[in-house]
Image (spheres, helix red, strand yellow):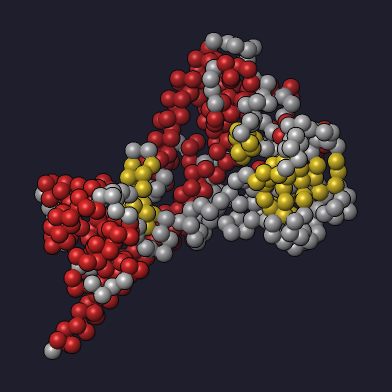
Amino acid sequence: MSRRLRAFKRWMKSHGFVYSDALEFVDSIDSGFSVRALCDLKEGDLVATIPKSSCLTIRTSGISSVIDDAGLGGFLGLAMALMYERSLGAASPWEGYLQLLPERECVPLVWSLEEVDKLLVGTELHKIIIEDKKFLYEDWKEYIEPLIQSRPLEIDPDSFGIEQYFSAKSLISSRSFQIDEYHGSGMVPLADMFNHKTGAENVHFTLTSSSSGSDDDIDADIFYAFDDEKPSVKNFTNTSVSDPIGTLEMIVVKEVEAGGEVFNTYGSMGNAALLHRYGFTEPDNPYNIVNIDLYLVRRWFSSSYSNRYVRTRLGLWRKLNYSGCTSQNSEYFEISSDGEPQMELLILLYIFLSENIYQKLDSVVDSLIEANEDDKMIKLLELTKTDCEHKLEDFREVLLTDNVCQALISLADVRESLYGLTSLQEDISRLLNCCELMESKLYHSLVLRVGERKILAKLRAYACNHFRTVKRRRGRKSSRRC
């Protein structure tokens, strides 16, 4: 066991942690921390409890009153608390925990702008990271810098600079948990040592209240270990005293065999979200998506149609209360991991590319403004005379006309052009020859790019398959008429 792990375990004992010796901490030079089972873990086993008073939050930090007086809350206040405790060094009550943490996590937020432009161009993260950097700098300039210059405490201003702020934000992004309403989010020692694996949650994180005696599940997951004695789930080391604020518990929710790694899960996230917040990706992640921005759709429309034509069709779609997904100043359509486009995009293309449907919908739009989704779909089916035999569950098939399918293929090409001149196969080849340990930024950015571009390939296949299906249907109808 490494020296820093031994120091951390001594710190846990002195701060009232309760942990099972059935779990082993591993500190690897190559892959960092992990937790493994020293014996079989069964569903329902309690493997650790963590005093909330030992979590690093705005409430528990030594600079709590200054943060409150300044009106700093949420992640901004937590970043201030983390920077302050790190500035104290060995004098911080969390020194035994903080010495485990890296200076910063390798999330794109702390990459250079040159690296962001080179590695993330075309991906879902490119614009987001650039905006994040801008907003975080503005936050620091508006809130942190004036607070430090006012010198509310005897602190070293160099510990609260812009680089330190970005470092603290990277740690909070990748390691913080929502604790409860009183504490908000915080750094939870022990909990952040468990690695994520999609669909492989072994433990669940819950909180208990010592005042009410009840358990309240919260949307987070954790677990932790101790290994000095003979492994046994029921063999606990308990040095805590009664905590009026309550504790956090880690419960096994999926069996783990002896020797296996015990995983937490950070949720069902695609690689863009994982890389954004935690700094890593997963090959063949089933939760990957690709977004096609509305402005790209409008640009594609405008390449062949007048501005008035585009404006009236988009206006009718809006009047029917349709919209894409929204995030900050962006509106977009999601393409799922299997290449299936969002329904709202299909409806927009259908309205846009069928003059007959547009005219009919425009004449009845006022009666549909307050209609629910099913009623609007039924009306579209009624207006599509040749497909009136379709049922509501076949609505997507009705929308996938040959023109809509061709439009989807074109939009996939437009979206893919954002990645630059390299092809998907070239990206796959670069990924196969890339070392994750030595070139982590390049590796994870390539995993993200390849995953997104494979979805665009599936979108093309999806459109082509439906296009061929439409042609076969026409052929059968033509032969029946003959």
Residue 157 in the image: x percent, y percent? 57, 16
Decide: is 461 above or below 273.
below
Screen quadrant of the C terminus? bottom left
Decide: is 289 above or below 279.
below
Give the image quarter of residue 212.
Answer: top right
Q: Can residue 350 be seen by looking at this rendering?
A: yes
Give the image quarter of residue 105.
Answer: top right
Q: Is residue 280 left or right of residue 86?
A: left
Q: Is residue 319 left or right of residue 56?
A: left
Give the image quarter of residue 413.
Answer: bottom left
Residue 260 in the image: x percent, y percent? 72, 60
Q: Is residue 429 left or right of residue 64?
A: left
Identify the residue at image location x=40%, y=40%: 128
Depth check, front residue: 357 or 203: 357
Identify the residue at image location x=32%, y=45%: 331
Q: Can residue 442 be seen by looking at this rendering?
A: no
Identify the residue at image location x=81%, y=59%: 39
Outermost residue, right direction? 230
Identify the residue at image location x=64%, y=56%: 201
Residue 420 in the image: x percent, y percent? 32, 51
